[in-house]
Amino acid sequence: MIQNQDQNVVSSKLIIYLPVIHSGYIKLLEKYPESEVFILDESLISLIDEEFDYLRKEIRSLSPIEAKVALGALFPNRKINLISVEKFLEISSQQTQREIKYILPNEDIFIWLQKKYLADQPVEFESTFLRWNRNNSAQKQQIESSVEISEDEFSKKIMSIADTQKELSSDWWRQVGAVVIRKNTASEETSTVGEIKNITAEETSTVGEIIAIAHNTQLPTPYSPYIDSDPRNSFHKGENIDLSTAIHAEAALISKAAKDGISLLGTEIYVTTFPCPACAKLVACSGISKLYFTDGYAMLDGDKILREFGVEIVRIKN
């Protein structure tokens, strides 16, 4: 992410907030070996605490002076100083200096600081691996590990069951349906919720059984949010997702299987929308080996968790 970049830049200043030493910042300093480094001082941290209350929980943080000493030990030949509110005010009052570029981590606090103090200066944002950016944490991400297939008769049949379940959801935020199946060889018997019908002759060797079907629903009844008020009304989409009266479709399926003593090892799940981070973890730990979906994006670490647990991810194109 680059803002106000100019070809005439001859020097750069790297400004960082360093409550802890980690490899993301070390790599950032190594990328800009000639840049002068500035660490936010206590006056700026006080402003940050007022503006970003969710960062107050970082109780392990180094003081700015400790951070400067630690960074100086790692980079003894670098010029490292603290930067204050007064210095930012001085910079913001100056005319645009095209010969100097300010390099900032792409995090909430620096997006805010850039708008507040550096709006007229050449700025370049660089990514670090921390999640001090609410937009990044809630960002929809393409699912890198997914295989894309065209819809066939088998997947169409299963997804139609999931779509039917989806319509039963009373959740006005999002309706999701899910189906867990176990594919059988020709010699295996089916014995659970129901056999999959109307499959083409070519697919008879992989006809399986439906282990469970579910949709996201409110608890203890589908009418709970309309009787007692829906807590989701108090938040924007993606915020405080744990404050909800709903159980997600994937969680409902896995809970039902656990209650009934049914192992999900080696089964496959079809979901109308890619799982949220919490449900992705449930799927990963449940023994489900393959996940099919038609819509949605990964958020936070959902895709990564599934990959780490060996769950194959397949997007079905309609």
Image (cartoon, helix red, strand yellow):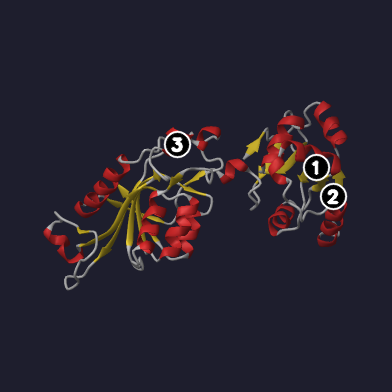
Answer left or right for 5 relative to 35: left
Tell me residue 170's x, y (percent): 36, 38
Residue type at tag 1: Ile
Determine the residue positioned at 74% across, 53% down.
Answer: 29
Q: Disc 1 and disc 3: Cα gap in Å?
A: 40 Å
The mark that comes first in sequence, 2 or 1, is 1
The mark that comes first in sequence, 2 or 3, is 2
Q: Which residue is mark 2?
A: 64
Q: Disc 2 and disc 3: Cα gap in Å?
A: 47 Å
Contact between marks 2 and 1 (CB within 8 A): the answer is yes
Q: Quadrant of the N terminus?
A: top right
Q: Which residue is mark 3?
A: 225
Q: Disc 2 and disc 1: Cα gap in Å?
A: 9 Å
Frontmost of labels 1 and 3 is: 3
Tell me residue 267's x, y (percent): 32, 64
Residue 69: mark in rendering: none
**Label 3 residue SS:** helix
Residue sitting nearer the eye, 118 or 59: 59
Residue type at tag 3: Pro
Residue type at tag 2: Pro
Tell me residue 232's x, y (percent): 51, 36
Q: Which residue is mark 1?
A: 45
Q: Is 219 located above or below residue 185 in the figure? A: above
Residue 111 appears in the rendering: yes
**Label 2 residue SS:** helix
Determine the residue positioned at 78% across, 35% down.
Answer: 99
Mark 2, Cα crowd under 10 Å, few <14 / some 14-19 / many 20+, is many
Residue 94 appears in the rendering: no
